[in-house]
Image (tube, coloured by chain):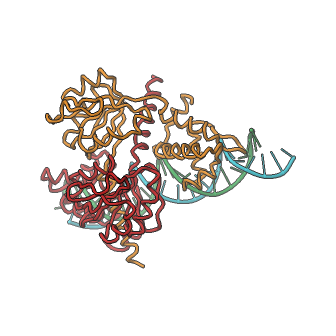
Chain colours: A red, B orange, C green, D cyan
DNA sequence: TAGATTGTTAATCGATTAACAATC
DNA sequence: TAGATTGTTAATCGATTAACAATC
């Protein structure tokens, strides 16, 4: 992967499809498939074969004419592209429902996402132990996260605390924020934000359900 | 909202922005703002004013020349468009981390999303009470969900159970599936699926972080 | 070599943005 | 009426799809 390939910006739509390709290749690998063509991928994923080839070519020519793609090689390439060939220190702000769920999610550790600290501002939670982690005072995010060298900050607080938490995390030097609060947080250039807006997602679902209703009424 | 307006399909990109508009209008309302122009919205949301007007016009002319939009009227319209002016019966399959988190999420009840049943296949969980709900046997999703008239099925199971659960839910007549399992589920036409792929989201975040790294290395 | 399948260019399609006439 | 701002058409931009030459 050369600097040039990084430079011509990869469309966000492509970035969104990469994890899906990755999941698919993992599945193929576990089925001990050695090779795969863009045509087979297009059938299995419900995408256009041209699109798949074009997507992959944003990062370089991983395939071979007349053969297709090597499953393990392609999986490895996407792993590198996604930045999964390293580990990340996560800190979680807010040990409520979502914080708790993430804490117990075994897949994260397995994939190199290590939860390095928990924070909350509720006195009754501070000091409480979860596994080998103790909930620390939310006021101390900046100093503690800086010491830990945290890479990613998870915001699992109520919405009114989200911006302040984001600010502390950014001040502590995190390079990415995974935001579960139902607001947009503002960060300085160079820091990445990825939102999980559960309500938004549920509302979209309701929209589509309502649209289906209208559609079927017309028949 | 006429049938015609429903018929000319609304781009998915627009649908994704609607919940954000809705959140924004709620915020304006709580600040007791009476009116808002597409220009102000564009500043606050970081979107193009033309785009906002065009988005809203997919559903009808809610504004007034020289004035803008009435906050409460527009909020009400979007509420209707999203289908939030009714209640929904949800059933949750899988009372693990995510199921548990959703169960405790107070916002859902408040917004008319009523959790009507919990299912799991783990014997040690079946019969366990959460609030006024008792975990029921996952084998009985179809019969019980049918009786309840469930609208939305939430899949919060491991990935290998997801398709089977989806099938039972669809057979029971749910019209929407909110899928938290890291697989795509197939459903018959007319049933809507909305995915929350936590891993995919985290991977996208890592991609962007890695891309920022490459970028800053070039300076 | 013949067949298969990529990488890539060209064509199409759709979404975003600009511009402005309509009108409150 | 003058000013503001929408609704909508036209222009631009970007993403998807089709087509095919390159090549394994």
Q: Is residue D9 above or below residue B115?
A: below
| Image coords of residue A202 (percent x, y) | 40, 39
Quadrant the C terminus of chain A occupies: top left
Q: Of residues B21 and B32, which is closer to you in this image?
A: B32
The part of the image, by quadrant, that contains residue B129 is top left
Q: Which residue is drawn at 52% across and 42% down?
A: B22
The part of the image, by quadrant, that contains residue A80 is bottom left
| Image coords of residue B133 (percent x, y) | 28, 29
Q: Is residue B45 left or right of residue B96?
A: right
Q: Can residue B7 be seen in this view?
A: yes
Q: Residue furthest front?
A: A123
Q: In this view, does B170 lie above or below A43?
A: above
| Image coords of residue A176 (percent x, y) | 37, 63
Q: Residue at x 33, y 68 (%)?
A: A144
Q: Is residue B185 left or right of residue B5?
A: left
Quadrant the N terminus of chain A occupies: bottom left
Q: Of residues A213 and C6, which is closer to you in this image?
A: A213
Q: In this view, does C9 lie above or below B32?
A: below
Q: Residue at x 31, y 72 (%)?
A: A147
């Amino acid at each position: 992967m050369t600097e040039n390939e990084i430079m011509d910006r990869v469309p966000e739509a492509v970035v969104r499809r990469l994890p899906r390709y990755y999941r698919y290749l993992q599945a193929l690998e576990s089925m001990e498939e050695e090779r795969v063509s863009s045509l087979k991928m297009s059938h299995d994923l419900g995408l256009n074969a041209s699109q798949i080839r074009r997507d992959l070519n944003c990062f370089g020519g991983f395939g071979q004419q007349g053969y297709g793609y090597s499953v393990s090689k392609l999986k490895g390439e996407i792993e590198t592209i996604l930045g999964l060939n390293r580990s990340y220190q996560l800190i979680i702000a807010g040990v409520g429902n979502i914080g708790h769920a993430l804490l117990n999610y075994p897949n994260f550790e397995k994939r190199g996402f290590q939860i390095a600290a928990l924070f909350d501002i509720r006195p009754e939670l501070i000091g409480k132990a979860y596994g080998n982690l103790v909930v620390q005072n939310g006021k101390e995010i900046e100093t503690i996260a800086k010491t830990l060298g945290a890479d990613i900050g998870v915001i699992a607080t109520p919405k009114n605390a989200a911006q302040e938490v984001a600010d502390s995390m950014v001040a502590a030097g995190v390079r990415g924020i995974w935001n579960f609060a139902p607001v947009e947080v503002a960060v300085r250039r160079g820091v990445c934000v990825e939102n999980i807006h559960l309500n938004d997602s549920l509302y979209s679902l309701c929209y589509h359900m309502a649209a289906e209703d209208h559609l079927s009424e017309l028949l």
